[in-house]
Image (spheres, grey):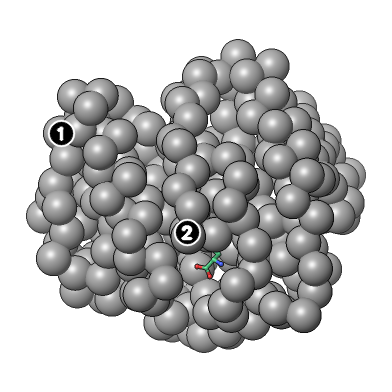
Amino acid sequence: MVFVNQQRVPRKRTYLMCPPEHFGVEYAINPWMDMSVPVDPDLAVKQWDRLRETLVGLGHTVHVLPAQPGLPDMVFAANGAFVVDGTVYGARFKHEQRTAEAAGHRAFYESQGWHFVAPTETNEGEGDFAYVPDAHGGLILAGYGFRTDPAAHAEAQEVLGRPVVSLRLVDPRFYHLDVALAALDDGNIVYFPGAFSVASQRVLAQLFPDAVLADDADVLAFGLNLVSDGYHVVLNSEATGLAHKLAAMGYQPVPVELTEVRKGGGSVKCCIAELRD
Ligand code: ARG
């Protein structure tokens, strides 16, 4: 066996998170949400704090967006916008239960002086958009099929000036792109092929021939819903198989427990938006 010792280099990031102070499963808009399963609110906050401290401990900057009562999914901060090259493409939620979250995100970006562009098309921010800066000169990968309208892919391309590749999601359990695909570093991704249409799988294979392919166990453990700085890969602690795979490739897995927000159908990545200037 040939063993290639790859040098992985972390890059400092800026993130936005929103505490689960008002988190709960009060409605069911994805197959993971079961209103009959109780959420432990104190544990939810504790686990979220741990996630935030982990990112800060790795040297990253974390901004905190105030949680709002009546918006139990606001903890999933990734859905509030998509930021590339200092431009913020705002979100427009599909479900009315989450619509009001977008204004909170917009207020944050505007107060911080970011260039904010309001969307006209339905899109759930980084839930359905990923950015790979060194792939093909800077590529946006975008999911559709459940939440984000494909018209938003074209809108994002116009707003952000980067090519957007549309990928069709076909399994309702993987209703957002970020539960089935993640950037591992500036040039490569990991994804679960079964979440995508056969044609979209071919597109991914063509664009990312060296991508890491995840299996059923990885995706069902929310392992793909990860945040990487290029070396440290923060991921759901249940995704042990994926953690081993990534460690063998020279990444440093950093497992975190997120049992409570997972009841809302999200994990690490869903809780974190990346602010790219
Ligand atoms: N309950 C939320 C919803 O269904 C979960 C969102 C998860 N966020 C994400 N980026 N995948 O909208």
Give the residue displayed 61% in from the left and 45% down from the top.
21
Mark sitting earlier along the chain (2/1)? 2
For disc 1, the neighbor class at 10 Å (few under 14, some 14 to 19, many from 20) is few
Is 53 rendered above or below residue 94?
above
> For numbered disc 1, what is the local secondary structure?
strand
Q: Residue at x 31, y 54 (%)?
A: 102
What residue appears at the point 49 percent right and 53 percent down from the top-left corner? Answer: 69
Percent x, y of residue 240? 88, 51
Residue closest to the eye, 97 or 215: 97
Count of labels shown? 2
Residue of label 2: 71
* Quadrant (top left, top right, bottom left, bottom right) of the N terminus: top right
Horizontally, is 183 left or right of 84 in the view? right
Residue with the mark numbered 1: 115
The reply to whether residue 7 is visible in this rendering is no
Q: Assign a secondary structure to mark 2.
A: loop
Task: Give the class, few, some or many, for how many residues have Cα within 10 Å of label 2's Cα (few <14, many ≥20).
Answer: some
Name the mark nearer the viewer: 2 or 1: 2
Q: Position of residue 202 (x, y in %)?
A: 47, 75
Residue sitting nearer the eye, 237 or 165? 237
For the residue marked with disc 1, what is the amino acid? His
Q: Position of residue 72 (x, y in %)?
A: 54, 59
Q: Position of residue 171 (x, y in %)?
A: 58, 84
Displayed quadrant of residue 114:
top left
The residue drawn where x is 28% and y is 76% is 149
Distance, label 2 to label 1, CA atoms, is 25 Å
Residue 52 vertical placement versus 137 (above, below): above
Asked whether residue 55 appears in the rendered view, the answer is: yes
